[in-house]
Each structure stands twice: as C-alpha cells, then as structure tokens.
Image (tube, rainbow, N blue to C red):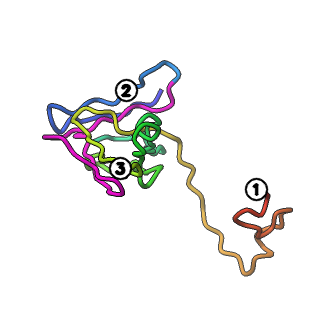
Amino acid sequence: MSILRVYKMRANAVIPRYETKGAAGMDLAACLEGPLVIAPGETARVPTGLQIALPAGQEGQIRPRSGLAARHGVTVLNAPGTIDEDYRGEVQVLLINHGSAPVTIQSEDRIAQLIVAQVTRVEIDVVNDDTNLGGTERGSGGFGSTGV
C-alpha cells in the first residue's frame, strides 16, 4: 500500500479520510477562519490547511462531491484538478456555484474528494504527417461523430 504524507498547516485542518471501506476518494474539508459565501456564478479558492507528499509516480485528482453538486449546484471548476507528485504547497480547491442561490462554506465542511492515481509518463515521437499516426475506423471524427 502506498503512503500519503500529510502536514496540517493549521490546527483546524481536517486530515483526509475514506468515509467507507469501498470509497475511491478521500474527503477534503475546508479550513477557514470564518464562513465563505459563494454567490451564484462565482468561484472561490477554498484552502484545506493541508500540504501533502504524494507517492512517487502518482497524482492527486481533486473531484467534486456529488452531494454539493446535487443539492447546491456547487462543483470543482477545473474537475478533475491535478496535484503533481512534486507539489508541496497548500492543497486548495477551486469551487464554482452553478446554483441559483448563494452557498455558505464553513470550516471543516467536506468540499471535494481526493483520489490518488497512478501516472503513466510517455516519450514523445514527433511524426512527419498524420498517416504515421496509424489509421482507425473513427479517423478524425470528433464531437458527436459516433452518434447522439
């Protein structure tokens, strides 16, 4: 099993944890000095009060919590956000309120999920033309090309 090292920058920071035995993500909680109100259409960078050291060859993915999205229309703006293994700053979550009412985030509210995932690094091979990419049945068909 891999180890995620966590440093609490502030006393009220909440250590991430899996809420159930089968959970894929650990909950991340806000670490605030007071309530944070996110108006409809607005974004907020929400601190967690945590610094982490990911295992070598892994990344942290910041994903929305379904309850916040379903109840309030609040989600992670850059979902999934990526934490590189060499980042050592504070973990922060960029939230956006897509709902119609302001949403108040309190310190220790669960605001996102952290998933630790394996990273595959590749070598780049620049080719002279697109025929060197190898043909497929789909070809260059993009948005909507495989049906509705």
Across and down, in percent, residue 142 comes to 72, 66
From this viewpoint, which residue is outermost toward the front? 100
Residue neighbourhood size for the residue with mark 1, other residues' Cα within 10 Å, grouped as few (<14), some (14–19), many (≥20): few
Q: Quadrant of residue 10?
A: top left
Q: Which residue is drawn at 22% across and 40% down?
A: 49
Q: Residue 17 carries which label?
A: 2
Across and down, in percent, residue 106 comes to 23, 36
Q: Label 3: which residue?
A: 95
Of label 3 and label 1, which has the lower sequence position? 3
Of label 3 and label 2, which has the lower sequence position? 2
Toward the viewer: 94 or 50? 94
Toward the viewer: 40 or 48? 40
Residue 84 shows in this picture? no
Q: Which of marks 3 and 1 is in front?
A: 1
Q: Residue at x 36, y 57 (%)?
A: 41
The reply to whether the C-beta atoms of the residues labelled 3 and 1 are less than 8 Å apart is no
Hey, what amino acid is under mark 2?
Arg
Toward the viewer: 1 or 49? 49
Q: Residue 148 carries which label?
A: 1
The reply to whether the C-beta atoms of the residues labelled 3 and 2 are less than 8 Å apart is no
Image check: 21 left or right of 137?
Answer: left
Image check: 133 left or right of 53?
Answer: right
